[in-house]
Image (cartoon, coloured by chain):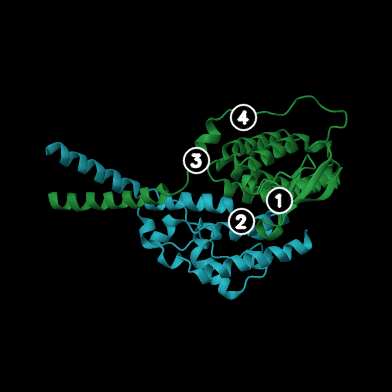
Amino acid sequence: MKKITMIISAGILALTFTACNSTGSKQTNNTDSATMPSVTTTSPAIAANAKPADGILTGYINLKNSLAADNGSDAAKNGQEILDALSKFDASALTPDQKKVFLGLVGDIKENSEHISENGDKIAHQREHFEMLSKDMYDLLKATGTSKEMYLDSCPMYDNGKGTWLSEMKEIKNPYLGNKMPTCGAVKETIK
Amino acid sequence: MHIFKKILLALLIVFIAIQFVQPARNKNGLVEPVDVTKAVSVPENVKMILQTACYDCHSNNTNYPWYTYVQPVGWILNNHIINGKKELNFSDFGSYPIRRQQSKLKAIADQIKDGEMPLYSYTIIHKNARLSKEQKALLTDWAQKAKDSLDKINP
Protein backbone atom coordinates (compact mmCIF):
# COMPACT_ATOMS: atom_id res chain seq x y z
CA MET A 1 0.00 0.00 0.00
CA LYS A 2 2.76 2.37 0.97
CA LYS A 3 4.71 1.63 -2.16
CA ILE A 4 1.69 2.19 -4.37
CA THR A 5 0.85 5.52 -2.77
CA MET A 6 4.45 6.58 -3.17
CA ILE A 7 4.45 5.71 -6.85
CA ILE A 8 1.17 7.47 -7.46
CA SER A 9 2.20 10.57 -5.57
CA ALA A 10 5.42 10.65 -7.56
CA GLY A 11 3.27 10.49 -10.68
CA ILE A 12 1.13 13.36 -9.47
CA LEU A 13 4.22 15.39 -8.70
CA ALA A 14 5.65 14.72 -12.13
CA LEU A 15 2.42 15.79 -13.76
CA THR A 16 2.12 18.97 -11.74
CA PHE A 17 5.70 19.71 -12.66
CA THR A 18 4.96 19.40 -16.37
CA ALA A 19 1.91 21.51 -15.76
CA CYS A 20 3.79 24.28 -14.01
CA ASN A 21 6.42 24.18 -16.68
CA SER A 22 4.07 24.83 -19.52
CA THR A 23 2.48 27.83 -17.88
CA GLY A 24 5.65 29.04 -16.21
CA SER A 25 7.48 30.09 -19.33
CA LYS A 26 4.48 31.91 -20.72
CA GLN A 27 4.83 35.63 -20.51
CA THR A 28 2.45 37.12 -17.97
CA ASN A 29 2.75 40.82 -17.59
CA ASN A 30 -0.83 41.95 -17.55
CA THR A 31 -0.44 43.35 -14.09
CA ASP A 32 1.04 46.53 -15.44
CA SER A 33 -1.89 47.46 -17.62
CA ALA A 34 -4.44 46.02 -15.21
CA THR A 35 -3.40 47.95 -12.14
CA MET A 36 -2.50 51.18 -13.87
CA PRO A 37 -5.25 53.75 -13.96
CA SER A 38 -5.92 54.65 -17.55
CA VAL A 39 -4.14 57.85 -18.41
CA THR A 40 -6.09 60.42 -20.30
CA THR A 41 -4.06 63.03 -22.06
CA THR A 42 -7.06 63.78 -24.25
CA SER A 43 -8.60 67.15 -23.73
CA PRO A 44 -12.37 66.86 -23.53
CA ALA A 45 -12.90 70.03 -25.55
CA ILE A 46 -14.55 69.17 -28.83
CA ALA A 47 -13.31 71.14 -31.78
CA ALA A 48 -15.79 72.57 -34.24
CA ASN A 49 -14.51 70.24 -36.92
CA ALA A 50 -14.37 67.18 -34.66
CA LYS A 51 -14.01 63.89 -36.48
CA PRO A 52 -15.17 60.50 -35.22
CA ALA A 53 -11.65 59.06 -34.96
CA ASP A 54 -10.22 61.96 -32.94
CA GLY A 55 -10.14 60.04 -29.65
CA ILE A 56 -8.38 57.07 -31.18
CA LEU A 57 -5.99 59.37 -33.01
CA THR A 58 -5.03 61.17 -29.78
CA GLY A 59 -4.14 57.84 -28.20
CA TYR A 60 -2.21 56.88 -31.30
CA ILE A 61 -0.19 60.13 -31.32
CA ASN A 62 0.67 59.68 -27.62
CA LEU A 63 1.72 56.12 -28.39
CA LYS A 64 3.90 57.21 -31.29
CA ASN A 65 5.66 59.76 -29.05
CA SER A 66 6.20 57.21 -26.26
CA LEU A 67 7.79 54.80 -28.71
CA ALA A 68 9.95 57.57 -30.17
CA ALA A 69 11.12 58.19 -26.58
CA ASP A 70 11.86 54.44 -26.17
CA ASN A 71 9.35 54.30 -23.31
CA GLY A 72 7.58 50.95 -23.40
CA SER A 73 5.60 51.33 -20.21
CA ASP A 74 4.11 54.65 -21.35
CA ALA A 75 3.42 53.06 -24.72
CA ALA A 76 1.48 50.33 -22.90
CA LYS A 77 -0.68 52.98 -21.23
CA ASN A 78 -1.25 54.65 -24.58
CA GLY A 79 -2.32 51.30 -26.01
CA GLN A 80 -4.96 51.16 -23.28
CA GLU A 81 -5.92 54.74 -24.14
CA ILE A 82 -6.67 53.66 -27.69
CA LEU A 83 -8.74 50.73 -26.41
CA ASP A 84 -10.74 53.10 -24.19
CA ALA A 85 -11.32 55.47 -27.09
CA LEU A 86 -12.33 52.56 -29.27
CA SER A 87 -14.94 51.41 -26.77
CA LYS A 88 -16.40 54.92 -26.78
CA PHE A 89 -16.31 55.19 -30.55
CA ASP A 90 -19.69 56.08 -32.02
CA ALA A 91 -19.98 54.10 -35.24
CA SER A 92 -23.56 55.31 -35.76
CA ALA A 93 -22.18 58.74 -36.74
CA LEU A 94 -20.50 57.20 -39.78
CA THR A 95 -21.76 57.02 -43.34
CA PRO A 96 -22.36 53.47 -44.67
CA ASP A 97 -19.09 53.59 -46.62
CA GLN A 98 -17.12 54.80 -43.61
CA LYS A 99 -18.76 52.18 -41.47
CA LYS A 100 -17.67 49.46 -43.83
CA VAL A 101 -14.05 50.60 -43.59
CA PHE A 102 -14.31 50.94 -39.82
CA LEU A 103 -15.74 47.45 -39.37
CA GLY A 104 -12.91 46.03 -41.47
CA LEU A 105 -10.34 47.70 -39.21
CA VAL A 106 -11.80 47.68 -35.70
CA GLY A 107 -10.76 44.12 -34.85
CA ASP A 108 -7.20 44.72 -35.96
CA ILE A 109 -6.92 48.07 -34.15
CA LYS A 110 -8.18 46.41 -30.98
CA GLU A 111 -5.85 43.46 -31.22
CA ASN A 112 -2.76 45.51 -31.99
CA SER A 113 -3.56 47.92 -29.14
CA GLU A 114 -4.07 45.01 -26.76
CA HIS A 115 -0.67 43.58 -27.61
CA ILE A 116 0.92 46.98 -27.14
CA SER A 117 -0.81 47.52 -23.80
CA GLU A 118 0.18 44.06 -22.52
CA ASN A 119 3.85 44.18 -23.49
CA GLY A 120 5.23 47.23 -21.69
CA ASP A 121 8.52 45.41 -21.14
CA LYS A 122 8.94 44.34 -24.76
CA ILE A 123 9.26 47.44 -26.84
CA ALA A 124 10.39 45.56 -29.96
CA HIS A 125 7.15 43.62 -29.86
CA GLN A 126 5.16 46.80 -29.29
CA ARG A 127 6.80 48.30 -32.35
CA GLU A 128 5.83 45.30 -34.48
CA HIS A 129 2.22 45.90 -33.56
CA PHE A 130 2.60 49.65 -33.91
CA GLU A 131 3.60 49.09 -37.52
CA MET A 132 0.32 47.26 -38.20
CA LEU A 133 -1.65 49.74 -36.14
CA SER A 134 -0.19 52.61 -38.17
CA LYS A 135 -1.57 51.05 -41.33
CA ASP A 136 -4.98 50.70 -39.71
CA MET A 137 -4.90 54.31 -38.56
CA TYR A 138 -3.96 55.54 -42.01
CA ASP A 139 -6.91 53.73 -43.58
CA LEU A 140 -9.24 54.93 -40.83
CA LEU A 141 -8.24 58.58 -41.24
CA LYS A 142 -8.49 58.31 -45.00
CA ALA A 143 -12.07 57.11 -44.61
CA THR A 144 -13.35 59.23 -41.72
CA GLY A 145 -11.18 62.34 -42.02
CA THR A 146 -9.02 64.05 -39.45
CA SER A 147 -9.51 67.27 -37.51
CA LYS A 148 -5.80 68.05 -37.62
CA GLU A 149 -3.34 67.79 -40.44
CA MET A 150 -1.37 64.55 -40.22
CA TYR A 151 1.75 63.37 -41.98
CA LEU A 152 2.51 59.88 -43.21
CA ASP A 153 6.18 59.21 -42.49
CA SER A 154 8.33 56.36 -43.65
CA CYS A 155 11.70 55.06 -42.52
CA PRO A 156 13.86 52.98 -44.90
CA MET A 157 15.83 51.55 -41.98
CA TYR A 158 12.98 49.63 -40.36
CA ASP A 159 11.38 46.43 -41.71
CA ASN A 160 12.78 46.86 -45.23
CA GLY A 161 11.32 50.32 -45.56
CA LYS A 162 7.82 49.13 -44.72
CA GLY A 163 7.81 50.92 -41.40
CA THR A 164 5.43 53.82 -41.80
CA TRP A 165 3.71 55.93 -39.15
CA LEU A 166 1.49 58.95 -38.76
CA SER A 167 2.68 62.13 -37.12
CA GLU A 168 1.07 65.39 -36.07
CA MET A 169 4.24 67.31 -36.90
CA LYS A 170 6.41 67.74 -39.98
CA GLU A 171 9.58 67.15 -38.00
CA ILE A 172 10.64 63.48 -37.97
CA LYS A 173 10.66 61.66 -34.65
CA ASN A 174 11.16 58.01 -35.39
CA PRO A 175 8.98 55.70 -33.25
CA TYR A 176 10.64 52.51 -34.52
CA LEU A 177 14.29 53.32 -33.88
CA GLY A 178 13.87 55.82 -31.03
CA ASN A 179 17.09 57.32 -29.73
CA LYS A 180 19.18 55.10 -31.96
CA MET A 181 18.15 57.04 -35.05
CA PRO A 182 15.61 59.65 -34.00
CA THR A 183 15.46 61.56 -37.27
CA CYS A 184 15.49 58.71 -39.76
CA GLY A 185 12.61 59.02 -42.16
CA ALA A 186 10.75 61.37 -44.46
CA VAL A 187 7.24 62.70 -44.96
CA LYS A 188 5.52 60.77 -47.72
CA GLU A 189 2.06 62.23 -47.66
CA THR A 190 0.00 64.90 -45.96
CA ILE A 191 -3.44 63.83 -44.75
CA LYS A 192 -6.01 66.55 -44.28
CA MET B 1 3.77 9.45 9.34
CA HIS B 2 0.13 8.66 9.75
CA ILE B 3 -0.86 12.16 8.68
CA PHE B 4 1.47 11.94 5.72
CA LYS B 5 -0.30 8.82 4.55
CA LYS B 6 -3.68 10.48 4.92
CA ILE B 7 -2.58 13.44 2.87
CA LEU B 8 -1.33 11.15 0.15
CA LEU B 9 -4.58 9.27 0.16
CA ALA B 10 -6.53 12.54 -0.11
CA LEU B 11 -4.32 13.64 -2.99
CA LEU B 12 -4.89 10.32 -4.69
CA ILE B 13 -8.65 10.68 -4.36
CA VAL B 14 -8.53 14.21 -5.77
CA PHE B 15 -6.31 13.00 -8.60
CA ILE B 16 -8.74 10.23 -9.51
CA ALA B 17 -11.75 12.52 -9.19
CA ILE B 18 -10.39 15.16 -11.55
CA GLN B 19 -9.90 12.52 -14.24
CA PHE B 20 -13.64 12.56 -14.74
CA VAL B 21 -13.58 16.20 -15.81
CA GLN B 22 -12.39 15.91 -19.39
CA PRO B 23 -12.52 19.07 -21.51
CA ALA B 24 -14.15 18.82 -24.92
CA ARG B 25 -11.70 17.81 -27.62
CA ASN B 26 -10.65 20.41 -30.16
CA LYS B 27 -10.97 18.19 -33.19
CA ASN B 28 -13.60 18.44 -35.88
CA GLY B 29 -11.62 16.71 -38.62
CA LEU B 30 -12.77 19.19 -41.24
CA VAL B 31 -10.96 21.47 -43.63
CA GLU B 32 -13.37 24.35 -43.49
CA PRO B 33 -14.13 26.59 -46.47
CA VAL B 34 -12.51 29.43 -44.54
CA ASP B 35 -9.31 27.44 -43.92
CA VAL B 36 -6.04 29.30 -44.47
CA THR B 37 -5.23 27.07 -47.46
CA LYS B 38 -8.34 28.44 -49.22
CA ALA B 39 -7.54 32.07 -48.43
CA VAL B 40 -3.91 32.23 -49.52
CA SER B 41 -1.65 29.85 -51.37
CA VAL B 42 0.08 27.40 -49.02
CA PRO B 43 2.74 25.12 -50.55
CA GLU B 44 2.76 21.51 -49.38
CA ASN B 45 6.04 21.79 -47.42
CA VAL B 46 4.75 24.83 -45.54
CA LYS B 47 1.48 23.04 -44.82
CA MET B 48 3.42 20.17 -43.26
CA ILE B 49 5.27 22.52 -40.90
CA LEU B 50 2.06 24.33 -39.98
CA GLN B 51 0.44 21.00 -39.18
CA THR B 52 3.20 19.69 -36.94
CA ALA B 53 4.28 22.91 -35.24
CA CYS B 54 1.24 25.22 -35.21
CA TYR B 55 -2.08 23.48 -35.68
CA ASP B 56 -2.25 21.90 -32.21
CA CYS B 57 -3.09 25.31 -30.75
CA HIS B 58 -3.95 27.39 -33.81
CA SER B 59 -6.58 25.32 -35.62
CA ASN B 60 -9.76 23.38 -35.00
CA ASN B 61 -7.82 20.12 -35.14
CA THR B 62 -5.49 19.30 -32.29
CA ASN B 63 -3.38 16.18 -32.35
CA TYR B 64 -3.76 14.78 -28.83
CA PRO B 65 -0.97 12.63 -27.32
CA TRP B 66 -2.05 10.07 -24.68
CA TYR B 67 -0.99 12.13 -21.67
CA THR B 68 -3.42 14.88 -22.54
CA TYR B 69 -6.13 12.53 -21.31
CA VAL B 70 -4.59 12.76 -17.86
CA GLN B 71 -5.72 15.75 -15.84
CA PRO B 72 -4.65 18.42 -15.08
CA VAL B 73 -2.45 18.19 -18.20
CA GLY B 74 -5.48 18.18 -20.48
CA TRP B 75 -6.92 21.27 -18.78
CA ILE B 76 -3.73 23.24 -19.19
CA LEU B 77 -3.48 22.21 -22.80
CA ASN B 78 -7.10 23.18 -23.31
CA ASN B 79 -6.35 26.67 -22.01
CA HIS B 80 -3.45 26.97 -24.41
CA ILE B 81 -5.71 25.96 -27.28
CA ILE B 82 -8.39 28.49 -26.32
CA ASN B 83 -5.83 31.29 -26.09
CA GLY B 84 -4.01 30.14 -29.20
CA LYS B 85 -7.16 30.04 -31.29
CA LYS B 86 -8.21 33.45 -30.02
CA GLU B 87 -4.97 34.94 -31.32
CA LEU B 88 -4.88 33.01 -34.56
CA ASN B 89 -6.95 30.17 -35.94
CA PHE B 90 -5.75 28.78 -39.25
CA SER B 91 -9.06 26.94 -39.68
CA ASP B 92 -10.93 30.27 -39.57
CA PHE B 93 -8.32 32.41 -41.26
CA GLY B 94 -10.41 33.10 -44.36
CA SER B 95 -13.24 34.55 -42.26
CA TYR B 96 -11.01 37.33 -40.89
CA PRO B 97 -11.35 40.78 -42.44
CA ILE B 98 -8.57 41.19 -44.98
CA ARG B 99 -6.68 43.66 -42.79
CA ARG B 100 -6.60 41.16 -39.96
CA GLN B 101 -5.33 38.50 -42.36
CA GLN B 102 -2.52 40.84 -43.42
CA SER B 103 -1.63 41.67 -39.84
CA LYS B 104 -1.70 38.01 -38.85
CA LEU B 105 0.67 37.03 -41.63
CA LYS B 106 3.08 39.75 -40.57
CA ALA B 107 2.71 38.68 -36.93
CA ILE B 108 3.41 35.06 -37.87
CA ALA B 109 6.70 36.08 -39.51
CA ASP B 110 7.57 38.40 -36.60
CA GLN B 111 6.84 35.80 -33.92
CA ILE B 112 8.94 33.16 -35.64
CA LYS B 113 11.81 35.58 -36.27
CA ASP B 114 11.71 36.68 -32.62
CA GLY B 115 11.72 33.04 -31.51
CA GLU B 116 8.47 33.51 -29.59
CA MET B 117 6.61 30.84 -31.51
CA PRO B 118 6.25 27.88 -31.30
CA LEU B 119 6.12 28.32 -27.52
CA TYR B 120 9.15 26.98 -25.67
CA SER B 121 6.93 25.06 -23.26
CA TYR B 122 5.37 23.32 -26.25
CA THR B 123 8.59 22.41 -28.01
CA ILE B 124 10.08 20.83 -24.85
CA ILE B 125 7.48 18.11 -25.16
CA HIS B 126 6.85 18.20 -28.91
CA LYS B 127 10.33 17.70 -30.28
CA ASN B 128 9.11 17.63 -33.88
CA ALA B 129 7.71 21.15 -33.42
CA ARG B 130 11.22 22.50 -32.97
CA LEU B 131 11.89 24.40 -36.15
CA SER B 132 15.24 24.29 -37.90
CA LYS B 133 16.72 27.45 -39.37
CA GLU B 134 15.56 26.33 -42.81
CA GLN B 135 12.03 25.61 -41.63
CA LYS B 136 11.85 29.00 -39.98
CA ALA B 137 13.02 30.67 -43.18
CA LEU B 138 10.47 28.67 -45.17
CA LEU B 139 7.64 29.79 -42.89
CA THR B 140 8.62 33.44 -42.71
CA ASP B 141 9.12 33.60 -46.49
CA TRP B 142 5.73 32.04 -47.02
CA ALA B 143 4.03 34.44 -44.60
CA GLN B 144 5.72 37.37 -46.31
CA LYS B 145 4.72 36.21 -49.78
CA ALA B 146 1.16 35.51 -48.71
CA LYS B 147 0.98 38.97 -47.17
CA ASP B 148 2.37 40.54 -50.34
CA SER B 149 -0.36 38.82 -52.36
CA LEU B 150 -3.00 40.32 -50.05
CA ASP B 151 -1.29 43.72 -50.12
CA LYS B 152 -1.93 43.75 -53.86
CA ILE B 153 -5.67 43.43 -53.28
CA ASN B 154 -5.75 45.72 -50.24
CA PRO B 155 -2.76 48.10 -50.23
Q: Nearer the viewer, residue A114 or B15?
A: A114
The secondary structure type at the circle numbered 1 is: loop
Specify whether B83 is left or right of B2.
Answer: right
Q: Mark 4, residues whose alpha carbon is within 10 Å: few (<14), some, or many (≥20)?
A: some
**Earlier sequence position, callout 4 versus callout 3:** 3
Q: Which mark is residue A38?
A: 4
Residue type highlighted by circle 1 = Cys
Q: Mark 1, residues whose alpha carbon is within 10 Å: few (<14), some, or many (≥20)?
A: some
On the same chain, marks 4 and 1? The answer is yes
Tag 1 residue: A184
Separation (CA) of disc 3 from disc 1: 31 Å
Placement of A88 over or under A138, stated as above or below = above
Tag 2 residue: B107
| Chain that appears cyan | B
Q: Chain of mark 3?
A: A
Tag 3 residue: A29
Q: Nearer the viewer, residue A190 or A157?
A: A157
Specify whether A159 is left or right of B124.
Answer: right
Separation (CA) of disc 1 from disc 2: 24 Å
Residue type highlighted by circle 3 = Asn
Report if residue B137 is visible in the image: yes
Q: Position of residue A133 (x, y in %)?
A: 69, 47
On the same chain, marks 4 and 3? The answer is yes
For the point 46% across and 65% down, the residue is: B129
Specify whether A75 is left or right of B19.
Answer: right
Q: Which mark is residue A127?
A: none
Q: Position of residue B37 (x, y in %)?
A: 64, 68
